[in-house]
Amino acid sequence: MNQEELFYQIKKKKSFLCVGLDTDENRIPVSLKGLDDPIFEFNKQIIDATNDLCVAYKPNVAFYESLGFKGWQSLEKTVEYLKKNYPEQFIIADAKRGDIGNSSSLYARAFFEQLKVDAVTIAPYMGEDSVKPFLSYPGTWGIILALTSNKGAADFQYLKDGESGDAFFEKVLKTSQKWGTTENIMYVVGATKAEKLKEIRKIVPDHFLLVPGVGAQGGSLEEVAKYGMNKKCGLLVNSSRGIIYASSEKDFADKAHDAALKIQVKMEEYLGKAGI
């Protein structure tokens, strides 16, 4: 899916919502736990209930890998279900990979050739050769971690370069643009760092940003839209727990729909104000 196709879905659905499928077997409803694949069934019902309100899904790979082979099977089935039934959805594997070139090439092959997702999140600490393999598949995206919202972000991401005066996250943004284009690179910017979006947009005005942290983590959707939106929206705002765990009862899918709808209504308002 290219940038124009993604923008088309945003305009069509009046939404830039990404639903995070951080599916924890310990938090899914008890009513599903006797099934052969409760993780997939949970995801399936969440997807069926929310697909008209979002433009992307982001399974966090750790939740599936932690279950071994059966977890990976659940992930594969989830991706296959999306591609078959909702092919307009943008699928992000939140894997945060990044290794020396030959290893990154194999990670890229796993996600783009085997799992066949649209995008993979990447940790850029090891530099260009660890990222470039993810950018070599036409129609797919590498989503580079730029400024995250976790406590440990302060350990490295704000450190200043002695010569340029750039913070580390600014250096990541400026340098990585040389590796690809606005058609194959996005950036992760945490919603709890919304005040930094104005500065980030000066560096990457045309790239899409994946913004986690709205909802359970307390990020402000209004501030993200105010400071982060560009002429093509340029945002995918992720909400995970606030949607998929809106209820732990049999009505979990209906409650997930309601939670997603509340966000989508706000997004429609912000898109309207931006003339999109």
Image (cartoon, rainbow, N blue to C red):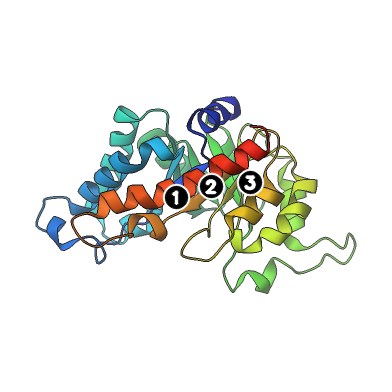
Residue designated by label 3? 129
The mark found on residue 116 in the picture is none
Q: Amino acid at mark 3?
A: Asp
Marks 3,1: beta carbons within 8 A: no
Residue type marked 1: Lys
Query: As drawn, is 193 to the left or to the right of 201?
Result: left
Name the quadrant of the C terminus: top right
Kindly identify which numbered label has been placed on residue 262. Answer: 1
* Towards the viewer: 274 or 248: 274
**Mark 3 and mark 1: Cα distance apart in space:** 41 Å
Would residue 47 appear left or right of 160 to someone viewing this image? Answer: left
Which class describes the residues within 10 Å of circle 2: few (<14), some (14-19), or many (20+)?
some
SS for callout 1 = helix
Element under disc 3? helix
Q: Quadrant of residue 125?
A: bottom right
* 247 and 92: which is toward the camera: 247
The amino acid type found where label 2 is placed reads Lys
Relative image position of residue 13 (x, y in whole percent): 48, 32
Q: In the image, which is nearer the foreground, mark 3 or mark 2?
A: 2
- Across and down, in percent, residue 244 comes to 34, 55
Neighbours of disc 3 within 10 Å: few (<14), some (14-19), many (20+): some
Q: CA distance from mark 1 to mark 2?
A: 7 Å
Residue that appears at 58% across and 42% down: 269
Q: Is residue 98 left or right of residue 195?
A: left
Do tag 1 and tag 2 residues touch (Cβ < 8 Å)?
yes
How far from the left and from the top, in percent, is residue 256?
33, 51
Q: Could you say which is closer to the camera, residue 175 or residue 46?
A: 46
**Which of the two discs, 3 and 2, labels the residue nearer the N terminus?**
3
Q: Which residue is mark 2?
A: 266
